[in-house]
């Protein structure tokens, strides 16, 4: 058995219903310290629903969440973040009218002088830190003082990702971080993820790209129709087995499929 | 080389301002045979006139940056002026409102005026933040209510006989100075403080602001309260200058303030705008009003031109927004 101390996140019978829709049914999920896992499943399988329950965006219908061994009930995304869970949501959540440093540090600004809401911002420090963060992640953004809204979709996605990656946190969750990214940008994001692995920061990656999943993670969790239908070590399986689990159909019908 | 995009947004608004002033100068020589700008007294009057609604506009700018709106400025000005004036009557006032409170130190009426304005703003903010009622409706309600309370407060009577020390605040160039100081302070606050950053963030993407941990409700209430307090300040300055408070004061000032904000380049969609732009917008409105009077053009034609300018400014804003959205 796993040593309890090794586990950073565990859910027990986590269930979410939207009226009659059983979006998530009795999910039992575990994540070990330093582990990188993927959640895969077809559209509507309940992946984003699962993420919304553990990040405080929504409250589960029933079931428990344990983070660092303690039972937690996050009533807002802020509480989850304060506990050390950083997330990149499917819709990014950036302020288009602010520049890159302002977005990276939103809600946790560096201050020159503390005076309640009228505290003076340390813009120079935030700019320097932002530069350092983005340099580390090899993201090319010509001018960090441009509004995020004036940047390309890929650059924006990279900003959202480096925001979550740049704050020392205990768990990072990325919901389809490379959807809509070009080849180079996808590579950059994957490099950020590899960097997190080296730093020992655990990660939950949601992705439809199985090749990417196999390249990046230790373990794959498969969701189907709101249920967890499998948990496999990436090195001990192949695309065909995963696809069978996603679809619930057996056999070598996927030989010519292009998603692997 | 010289590129338009590298200039601050204020540069083009300022160019419009200069253009309008020069236009009136030319028209002045052509039709009235006099210089428009060469008259120092006229320039002083322009600046004094615009200072009062300019103070309101500084608050409205912040509200609009959060993608809200405040229609209550003029009415809150009147209510604050009435209440402040009732605490500023001189010892020899005839039939005073509060016979027991005469000849008070001026700090008291000033504080009372600011507090009344802040309370109105707080109500605007709380309704906007805690109910689903849009700010347009909430502050429209305040516009009607505050004006009515201002009438009821003295049963429709104006408040006269304000003490000399109180009327001194509105004399000379004081209103201009108050406007200028308020504008500079809030320009810097918006630019360099956490309050400012969060104001822009909320207007830009409220959901993202919430996810980033900003207490959006509390912040909105703070912004509306500040806007209310500034309307209250405008009321204090106005009744002190007029040496009388009347419930009909500041009628339509909220529209002048909003116009100045929009002309000054602040986006009605939220997330963008600066007090420096608003100050130029205020000056543009002042020059137009004064210029038309100078050319002896009817008041109603002035209003038509003002209306067209506002619609034009909003159209420009929409074009900018559409361009940005198509890129994102
Ligand atoms: N707020 C909601 N109200 C009602 N039903 C919802 C709500 N949110 C999600 N659902 C339903 O729950 C199910 C799971 O949705 P979820 O967003 O978790 O899917 P997903 O696995 O993330 O899919 P995708 O790969 O398309 O992002 C779907 O059937 C969806 O329609
Ligand atoms: Mg999803």
Image (spheres, coloured by chain):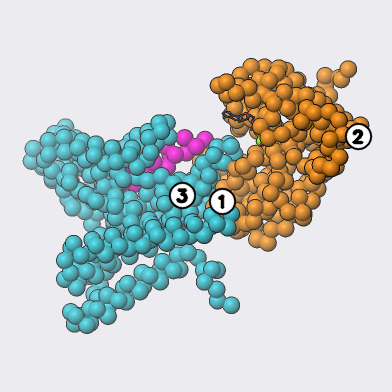
Q: Quadrant of ligand 1?
A: top right
Q: CA distance from mark 2 to mark 3?
A: 50 Å
Q: Which label sits in the foreground, 2 or 1?
A: 2
Structural crowding at the residue carrying mark 2, measured as other residues with C-alpha within 10 Å and reported as few (<14), some (14–19) or many (≥20): few
* Disc 3, SS: loop
* Disc 1, SS: loop
Of the chain colours in the picture, the one used for chain A is: orange
Q: Which residue is mark 3?
A: B270
Give me the residue at 72% from left, 23% from top. Answer: A227
Of the chain colours in the picture, the one used for chain B is: cyan
Whether residue B61 appears in magenta in the rendering, the answer is no
Disc sitting over residue A235 in the figure = 2
Chain letter of the residue beneath label 3 in the structure image: B
In terms of secondary structure, what is the magenta stretch mainly?
helix
Structural crowding at the residue carrying mark 1, measured as other residues with C-alpha within 10 Å and reported as few (<14), some (14–19) or many (≥20): many
- Say whether disc 2 or disc 1 marks the residue closer to the N-terminus: 1
Quarter of the image with the C terminus of chain B is bottom right
> Residue B83 at what x, y percent from top left?
22, 39
Pick whichever, B320 or A32, lies toward us.
B320
**Quadrant of residue A236 within the rendered picture:** top right
Chain letter of the residue beneath label 1 in the structure image: A
> What stretch of residues is rendered in magenta?
B215-234
* Disc 2, SS: helix
Considering only vertical position in the picture, is A66 above or below B305?
above
Mark 1 CB near ligand 2 (8 Å cut): no
Quarter of the image with the N terminus of chain B is bottom right
Q: Is any atom of residue A176 visible in this view? A: yes
Considering only vertical position in the picture, is A20 above or below A214?
above
> Residue A229 at what x, y percent from top left?
78, 24
Q: Which residue is mark 1?
A: A96
Q: CA distance from mark 3 to mark 1?
A: 11 Å
């Amino acid at each position: 058995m796993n040593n309890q101390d090794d586990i950073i996140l565990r859910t027990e019978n986590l269930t979410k219903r939207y009226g009659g829709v059983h979006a998530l049914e009795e999910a039992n999920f575990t994540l070990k310290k330093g582990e990188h896992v993927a959640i895969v499943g077809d559209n509507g399988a309940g992946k984003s629903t699962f993420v919304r329950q553990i990040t405080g965006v929504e409250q589960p219908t029933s079931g428990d969440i344990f983070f660092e061994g303690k039972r937690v009930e996050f009533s807002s995304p802020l509480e989850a973040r304060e506990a050390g869970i950083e997330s990149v949501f499917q819709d990014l959540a950036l302020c288009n009218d602010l520049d890159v440093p302002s977005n990276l540090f939103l809600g946790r600004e560096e201050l020159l002088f503390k005076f309640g809401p009228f505290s003076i911002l340390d813009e120079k420090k935030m700019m320097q830190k932002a530069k350092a963060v983005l340099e580390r992640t090899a993201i090319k953004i010509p001018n960090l003082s441009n509004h995020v809204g004036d940047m390309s979709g890929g650059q924006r996605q990279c900003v959202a990702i480096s925001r979550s990656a740049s704050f020392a946190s205990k768990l990072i969750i990325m919901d389809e971080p490379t959807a809509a990214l070009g080849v180079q940008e996808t590579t950059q994001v994957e490099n950020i993820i590899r960097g997190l692995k080296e730093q020992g920061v655990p990660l939950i990656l949601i992705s439809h790209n199985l090749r990417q999943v196999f390249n990046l993670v230790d373990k794959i969790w498969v969701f189907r129709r709101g249920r967890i239908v499998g948990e496999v070590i990436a090195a001990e399986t192949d695309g065909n087995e995963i696809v069978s689990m996603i679809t619930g159909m057996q056999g070598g019908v996927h030989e010519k499929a292009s998603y692997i | 080389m010289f590129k338009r995009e590298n200039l601050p947004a204020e540069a083009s608004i300022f160019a419009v301002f200069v253009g309008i002033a020069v236009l009136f100068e030319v028209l002045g020589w052509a039709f009235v045979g006099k210089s428009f700008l060469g008259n120092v007294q006229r320039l002083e009057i322009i600046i004094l006139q615009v200072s009062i609604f300019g103070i309101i506009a500084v608050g409205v700018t912040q509200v609009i940056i959060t993608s809200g709106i405040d229609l209550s400025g003029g009415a809150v000005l009147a209510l604050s002026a009435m209440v402040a004036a009732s605490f500023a009557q001189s010892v020899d006032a005839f039939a005073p409102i509060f016979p027991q409170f005469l000849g008070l130190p001026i700090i008291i009426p000033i504080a009372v005026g600011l507090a009344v304005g802040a309370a109105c703003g707080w109500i605007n903010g709380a309704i906007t933040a805690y109910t689903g009622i849009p700010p347009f409706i909430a502050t429209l309600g305040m516009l009607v209510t505050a004006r009515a309370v201002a009438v009821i407060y003295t049963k429709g009577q104006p408040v006269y006989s304000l003490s000399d020390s109180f009327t001194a605040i509105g004399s000379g160039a004081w209103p201009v100075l108050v406007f200028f100081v308020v504008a500079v302070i809030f320009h810097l606050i918006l630019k360099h403080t956490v309050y400012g950053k969060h104001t822009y963030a909320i207007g830009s993407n409220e959901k993202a602001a919430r996810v980033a941990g900003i207490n959006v409700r509390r912040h909105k209430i703070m912004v509306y309260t500040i806007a209310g307090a500034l309307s209250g300040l405008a009321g204090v300055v106005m009744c002190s200058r007029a040496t009388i408070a009347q419930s009909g004061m500041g009628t339509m000032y909220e529209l002048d303030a909003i116009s100045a904000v929009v002309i000054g380049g602040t986006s009605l969609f939220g997330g963008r705008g600066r007090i420096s732009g608003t100050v130029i917008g205020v000056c543009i409105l002042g020059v137009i009003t004064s210029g038309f009077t100078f050319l002896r053009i009817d008041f109603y034609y002035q209003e038509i031109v003002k209306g067209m300018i506002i619609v034009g400014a909003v159209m420009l804003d929409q074009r900018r927004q559409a361009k940005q959205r198509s890129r994102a």
